[in-house]
Image (cartoon, helix red, strand yellow):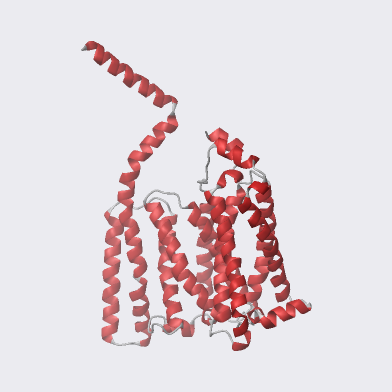
Amino acid sequence: MSSCVRERLCWLVEGNKEESLNPERRERRDRARKKPQTSIMSASAGTGVFMLSLMSIPFCYLFNSLIYNNGAEAFFFAGFSAVLILTISVRFMLKKKAPVDRLFYVYAVFAFLSVVNLIIGLEQDNIIDGFVTFYLKEAEPHINTAHGHMISYWDGCVHYLMYLLMIAAITWGDSYRTIGLYWVGSFSMRTMVYILGNAVGKYGTQVTPLFILHILYISMSVWACFRIFSQPSTHDAQLTSIQEAQRTSLLHRPLDLLFIVYLIPALAFCVFRGLVVLDCSSKWCEDYVQQFEPYLKDPTAYPKVHMLVSMLYSGPYYIITLYGLLVPGCEWVLDLTLVHSGAVAQAQFSHIGASLHTRTPFSYRVPADSQSVFLLVNVLYALVPHALCYHCCTQPAFFLNPKQEKKTQ
C-alpha cells in the first residue's frame, strides 16, 4: 500500500517539474480551461450587438417620421420597436461579462451604421420608402450618385458580415486577424476613392456638416486598422515542410507559375487604365473609353480616382508580389494579399455596379454590345487576386521564415 502511494507521489512531483520546465504547456492548459467559460460569458454580448444593429431599422423610421410626420400610428410603432429591440440587446449585453477587446465596441457601432447604409441603398432604389427620405434630400449629394449606391450596398452587406464575424471571433476568443486584414483593404479603398472623389468631382464645393462625422468614422477605422496589424500572425507550418517547399523550383510549383503569368498582364492593365483617366492621347486609350468603359470619363471623378489609386498602389503590389512568389521567405506576402484582395473586391464591385447603374448618365454607361467583354475582364480582375490570397493563406510554407519558425518550435 505504501509503495503505491509512494509511486503516486513521485508521479505527481515529476509532472509538476515537467510543467514548471515547460511554461508553454501550462499556459495552453490554463487557456483551454478558461476559454469555454470566457466564451459563454461573452457570447451573449455578441448576440446583443446583433440585436442592437437591427435597432437601426426602427430608429431610421422613427427619425424620418419625426421630420415628415408620417402619422401617429407609424411614429408610435417605430418608437415601440426601437425601445423593445434596445431593451433586448442591452439585456443580452449586460447579462454576462462583456469582452475586454475595445474593437468589440467599435465594430458594434460600425455594424449599426452598416444596416443604416443598407437602408439608404434600398430606399435609393425605391425598394423601401419612408426610412431615410430626409437624409437623401438634405444630406450630402454624393450619396445619390451611382458610386454612392454601390458603396451603400457594399457597406450594408459585405462590411456588415465582416463586422459580425469579427465580433463573433472576439466573443469566442478566436483570432480575427485574417478577416480584419481583408476589411482593412476594403475600408482603405472605399475611403480613398470616396473622399478624394468628393473633393475633385462635380460635388466638391458642396460640403455639409456631416463631413465632420465622416472624418470621425475614418479616424476610428484607422485606429482599428492599426490594432489589427498589431495582432500576432496565425500562419504557421512545420520546419520540415517549410524547408521542403522552399527547395522546390518554380517549374514544380505550377500554381505559383500561373499566378506569375497573371501578374504581368494585370500590372499592364492597371497602368493602362491609369493612363486612360489621365487623358492619354493614344488611339488605344481613346478606343477603349468609347467602346468598353466610357464611365471612366464620368464627371463625378470616382472612376478617375479609382484608377489612379489602383495604378499607384496596386501597380507596386503586383511587382513586389511577383518578387515574393520567386524568392522564398517573404512573410509579408501573406498579409499583403489579404489587404489587396479586400481593396480590389470593394473597388471592382463599385466600379462594375456604377458602370451599369441607371443613375449613371446613359452616355457614360457601358455599351450593350461590349458588356460581356467588360464583365469578363473586370470580374477576372477581381477574382484572381482572391485565388492568389487563398493559395498563399492555405499553403504558407514557401513564404514563412524558417529561422523564426525554428525559434518558435
Residue 312 appears anywhere in the view: no
Which of 397/211 is in front?
397
Asked if 98 appears above or below 132 in the picture, the reply is above
Q: Quadrant for residue 197, please give it.
A: bottom right
In-image side of 263 versus 375 (left or right):
right
Q: Residue at x 56, y 46 (%)?
A: 396
Q: Which of 52 and 377 is in front in this view?
A: 377
Q: Position of residue 13 (x, y in %)?
A: 34, 19
Q: Where is residue 326 in the image (x, y as percent from the top left)?
A: 68, 49
Question: Quadrant of residue 60 in the image?
Answer: bottom left
Residue 288 x/y as whole percent? 70, 78
Depicted 283 relative to depicted 168: above or below:
below
- Looking at the image, the residue that sits furthest to the top is 2
For residue 277, side relative to residue 192 (left or right)? right
| Quadrant of the rendered image containing residue 111 | bottom left
Count of numbered badges drawn on the protein: 0
Quadrant housing the N terminus: top left
The reply to whether residue 109 is visible in this rendering is yes
Q: Where is residue 86 in the image (x, y as percent from the top left)?
A: 30, 67
**Residue sitting nearer the eye, 325 or 373:** 373
Residue 189 to residue 299: above or below = above
